[in-house]
Amino acid sequence: MKKFLVPLILLVLLPVVLLSLAAWRLVQNERAALALQWQDLIAVQLHDIDNNVQDYFQRQQQQLEQALAELNPADSAELQLFKLSYPGLLQLWVLDKSGARLYPAGDLSLAEQQWLERTESFWQTYGRSAQLQARSPENRPEGLQLTPLQEAAPAEPAISPDLARRQGWYVWQWGDQTHLIYWWQDPDQQLWVVELEPSYVLAELIALLPATPSRRDSNSANARIQLHDASGALQYQWGDYQPSGQQQPLLQRPLSYPLGSWTLNYYGAPLNFGQAALGMTSMAIIAVVTLALAVLAWLLYREHRREYRLAQQRVNFVNQVSHELKTPLTSIRMYAELLEQSYSDEDTSTEQRYLRVIVSESQRLSRLINNVLSFAGWQKGRLKLRPRPACLDDIVQNAAQTFTPLLSAKQITLTLELNVAKTFRLDADVIEQIVHNLLGNVEKYVPAGGHVSIRTEQQAKMLIISVQDNGKGIPKREQQRIFQPFYRMSSALTEGVSGAGLGLSISRQLARLHGGDLVLKHSTQGACFQIRILPQ
Amino acid sequence: MKVLIAEDDPHISQGLQDLLNHEGYETLIALDGQAAWEAYQDYQPDFILLDIMMPKRDGYQVCRDIRRDNTEIPVIFISAKSEEIDRVVGLELGADDFIMKPFGTREVIARIRAITRRCYRQQAVLAPELSQEFTLADITVSPAELRARRGDEVIELSLRDVKILQILHAHPGQVISRDTLYNQAWGRNYIASSRTLDQHISKLRKSIERDPAQPIIIQTVHGVGYRFDG
């Protein structure tokens, strides 16, 4: 029963384990898929914000270009008015084709000079620094060094200036503010440079940004978006969520040109995506499947146990009946043999003849019971050897002597050729049972006047007992079947002959138990059975 | 030689008693485990045939009790179930041999003779004369082995056979009367039919004489008894 339990438990556990693994993977994949979807949603959200910022700068660019195109670069007053009136305009500079400063005209104020110093990198980028020298060297602020006109690669451009383009933005960090310069080269090759007020730009940007995150997803209500400048300083944030000090953003996105050094950080609560619900559902399904499998397994086990119990009862019944038969049979056989011994061999009285029948039939019944018990033991896997020192020739001789009266009664002659006189560790009872079964078949199937010979020999480690008769033999088509339990050849030969069909099958099992085999050898006449025994 | 037969089935125990008596053994029957233990203590047998399933005390328990007292006495178990024999062997109760039911008389005799040889080998240490071989015509009889030999031929003998041959050998040329043979080979209290001795002598001749019809070793003196001429 234990052998059945293990595969049954595996039958239940294996699908449950596989199902659990599959469910876990499913949940993990779902979670990953939802996380990706959520990431995409956030990315789209940040992308929208970035687009808005880009749009703003596009509009500013267009507006500035439009406004500057209408100005007369030679009219300082107009330019001054424009500078003062244009919203968020901090500086306005105009250079002519040769790079000479047209506006501001004349001497630069201190503020303008300081501005130049601050924007030196910009001017160097565009190789126009020399033309901007508005003061004589003696009026130049101490320490100010302007590089001569040359092509200068940008040191660390905040944006990549496209010198082939006619306009662009230049961003630089100064102090705690981000400064923006817009430059435009008009059709006359005049360079217009404007700086926008940082706080004005920031205010304009903030006006573009929402007060709360988008409500497209239920999770986003609990989120926060932060806008950081190039130095990482927080410029603006919105949303209900409060990130902890060390918390990393769920997604980070740099803004597009011209504020590419600014970033949007998206913070949110750990996402569950309804994971608990998905996990509960999976567990519920697994529980139902486990229950169903367990019920099925229990039904199978119960059915198997019932069958096993029935089979055991049958086997136990066979065992019990066989054992109960043995006791009276012992008395019958023993008393018949005792009575037989009281007659001398010369006596041919009817009583002695009757006694011989009682003895031979009780011996036959003993053999049958032994075969049935051996078969039952074989079925239960409980056939066992009990080897002891014994001589093979003695065993064969004893077994043959038992059959001598029976064979003589049918005028079947028996010859022995015994060649293994040495002592080996053998189970004498097992070997005798095999020889008895073979001689029993000889007595049943060999016609009167026949002959049987038994020969023992040793081949290497194997001991061989050959039983050869001169009967009708066994047809080729039957030669394997005869070793099957309960099989009896149906032929004129066996018709009317009693037997349970166990002798050869159990004899083969016993021979194999003894490390050998029982085989039917080819014979020109009759049947030749060969018993192979391996001493233990 | 004394044998205790502990078997609760009266038919089997009686049959074994008859068989062993015929072989030349003294026997006592015990029909349950308690009686077996008491008989062992009182009877002091040379060996014991012990059934396993008996009332009052089973064979295992009796064997354990006997072994506590005597580790040498041979014990042969009788059983109908091979599982019980496995227990006997597995439990190492000290059984010397076992007989499975249903057994044939020859099987029992073979087992008993093997035990007897062993007992004789043990007793021969104390009484060497028991193991002394002797010759009758062309056979040599070994009492300790319960065998006789004629050249390479080995002849199996029962205890009673050996006794009869010992009596004849001890009195070469003398006629041993039937009563004397009865008394010495069967015991003084034995009452036998007239055919018992004759049948036994007839069977013994078949074993040891070259020509049983013209015996040399055991010669019949009609109306008196038997003689060995020496």
Image (cartoon, grey):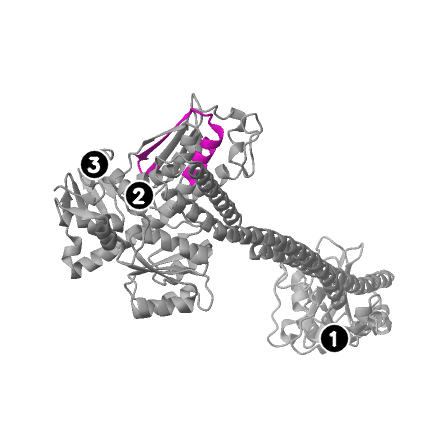
CA distance separating discs 1 and 2: 133 Å
Q: Name which residue type carries label 1.
A: Gln
Measuring from the top left, give residue B202's x and y in whole percent: 28, 40
Q: Chain of mark 1?
A: A
Residue at (57%, 31%) from the top-left corner?
A496
Q: Is residue B185 left or right of residue A497?
A: left
The one nearer the camera, B145 or A511, is B145
Q: Which segment did they paint magenta?
A: A434-463
> Can you identify the residue that label 3 sits on?
B215
Quadrant in the picture for residue A275:
bottom right
CA distance separating discs 3 and 1: 139 Å
> Can you identify the residue that label 1 sits on?
A235
Assign a secondary structure to mark 2.
helix
> Can you identify the residue that label 2 sits on?
B199
Please say whether residue A191 is visible from this viewpoint: no
Assign a secondary structure to mark 1.
strand
Residue at (15%, 38%) from the top-left corner?
B138
Q: Is residue A20 left or right of residue A213?
A: left
Q: Chain of mark 2?
A: B
Q: Nearer the viewer, mark 1 or mark 2?
A: 2
CA distance separating discs 2 and 3: 15 Å
